[in-house]
Every structure is written in structure tokens, then in C-alpha cells.
Amino acid sequence: MTRDEFKALTDKGVVLLDGATGSNMTKAGMPKGTSTELWILDHPEPLQELQRAYVEAGSQIVYAPTFCCNPYSMKNFGREKDVYELNGRLVALSKAAVGGKAYVAGDMTTTGKMMEPRGEMTFEELYEIYSEQAKALVEAGVDLFTVETMLGVDETSVALDAIQAVCDLPIICTLSVEADGSAYYNGNAVEAVETLQGMGASAVGVNCSVGPDQLTAVIASMKQVAEVPVVAKPNAGMPFITETGEAVYDMDAERFARCIGDLIKAGAGIVGGCCGTTPEYIRAVHKILGR
């Protein structure tokens, strides 16, 4: 997928992403504390069934389950030297699931470590981590990239730099922010748009963290400075934790879709769902888009 093709897609109207992966794999039996990526490779059927359902519900872009499949995170499971193999296999699962009916995005995320001077992670270390996964995802044949659930503008900038040094594919960048638009590590939603679009991001927005009902002002403020599409991929409301440790989200699919409609009015041009959402939620959003 070229950047021009991405722009043509977004110019046609609101683009619909997929919903959650991790929370649905937990429902499918994935135990706590395991690597989602490794569990999916051992149990591919739930992932492929989920992604087929997202496409049937109307998703135009589906995220490959490569979220934490970088050398830093995979070191926790002794698989840091297998990044090329693992990303390749995970992308292949998604490509087979969607069967050419949707674009497959290579998914990358934060290491969870703050950069110097706030933390111990150096620019060079972070750049190499993102660069290695980016090369693996390009080799696997992804159509575009998404850098999601990022905790600060600085680390997102490093990921963007690393990907663009490897390829010229479209890149969607989304940060996880507070209800007031503040990022957890540094910067805020408006700064993210201004910085990342200037560096070459094809779309910038927010995902995870809060429900869509809390993001209207954030999306509106991003839209005011945006020269690229604004992305909204929120959770299904706010979670509460049961006695067994399960996260249950407080927003059903119909209310979620209505709130996404409000975010579209506020300026979102690319929408989807994060934690707690299912194909039912994407189908409800698809319906409000009139498709």
C-alpha cells in the first residue's frame, strides 16, 4: 500500500479499523502472564476466527498480532533472536484470515521504558528495537504500519524514524492519553499531531486508555491542527475488575457506536475499537457509517 493509496482511502470517507485482540484472546482461553504473540502462534484458530469476523463486520484495516513482538519484549520469553521468524508467522496468520478483503497493518508498541533523561532507555537502544521489528514486518509483507498505545511523543517519534528508514509504507501513530489529552510519559494529543505529521506520519490519533465518551474534546483539539486524518480507537468504556481479576468494560456496542459517531463529528477520520471491543462493536460502528 502506497502513501497515495492510503490517502485515497481516507479521502473516500471514514476508515474503519478492527477492534481488540488481547481481550478477545483472553476470552478464548489465553492465560494471564503469557506472551500474546507466542500464545497465538500455538493457538492460531481464535485469532483467525476473530479477524475474519472483523472483516465481515466492516473492518478495512486489520492489525496483525505483532504488538509486543520486538526484541526487547520478547527477551522476557527467551525469543529475542527470533523476531524475524515470529513476526513473519504472525503476519501470515492475519493475511490468511483476511484473504485480501482488508489491509493488514504491522502493529508495534511501546517498550514501556522511559527514554533518557527521564529514564534509562537511550535513543539508540530504542531506535534499534523498533528498527529490527520494522524490518521483520516489511519482510513479512505488511500493507502499512500502526504504532499504537504509545506513552509519549518522544518514543513515538523514534518508532516513526525507524520505520521510515526501512520503508515508505503509510504509518498510523496513536498514543494512549488521559481524558484531558495528556500523554503518560511526555507531551499531549495536540503536540503529537503537530510533531508526528511533520515527521511523516500518515495519520495520528489516540487509542486505548479511556472510553469514547471521554475523548470528544481531545479529538476536536487534534483536528484543529491536523493536516492528516485523526484516529480514534478507544476502549469499550472504562473497566471494572471482577473478584477473579477479569476486566469488564461498561459500554455496550450500541452506545459505543453512538459515541464513535460523536468522535467522527468532532473530527475523527479513522475509527475502531481497543480493549473490550469485539466484532459486534465494529459492526455497530459500520452501521452508523451507513454502509
Image (cartoon, rainbow, N blue to C red):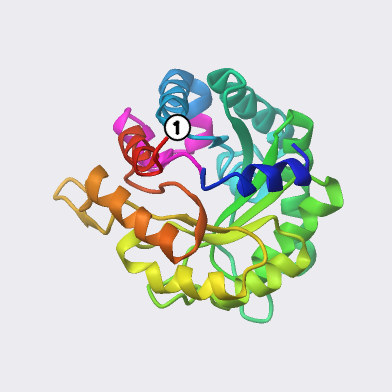
Residue in the image at 70% along x and 35% along y: 143
Q: Which residue is mark 1?
A: 58
Name the residue located 67 percent from the left edge and 45 percent from the top edge.
145
Tell whether 204 sits left or right of 238. Answer: right
> Measured from the top left, where is residue 6 in percent x and y?
69, 44
Q: Secondary structure at mark 1?
A: loop
Quadrant into which the C terminus falls: top left
Q: Residue at x 32, y 28 (%)?
A: 29
> Nearest the camera: 108 or 6?
6
The percent coordinates of residue 126 (x first, y second) are 72, 61
Query: Magenta part of the protein: which range?
Result: 16-39
* The residue positioned farthest toward the left in the image shown: 243
Specify few, some or many for label 1: CA neighbours under 10 Å numbering under 14, 14-19, or 20 or more: many
Measuring from the top left, give residue 146's x and y in whole percent.
62, 48
Tell me if residue 187 can be seen: yes
Q: Quadrant of the N terminus?
A: top right
Measured along the vertical axis of the image, is residue 255 above or below residue 220? above
Residue 137 as seen in the image, left or right of residue 242: right
Is residue 29 on the magenta stretch?
yes
The front one of 236 and 110 is 236
Is residue 160 one of those drawn in magenta? no
- Residue 91 lies in quadrant: top right
Q: Residue furthest bottom?
A: 117
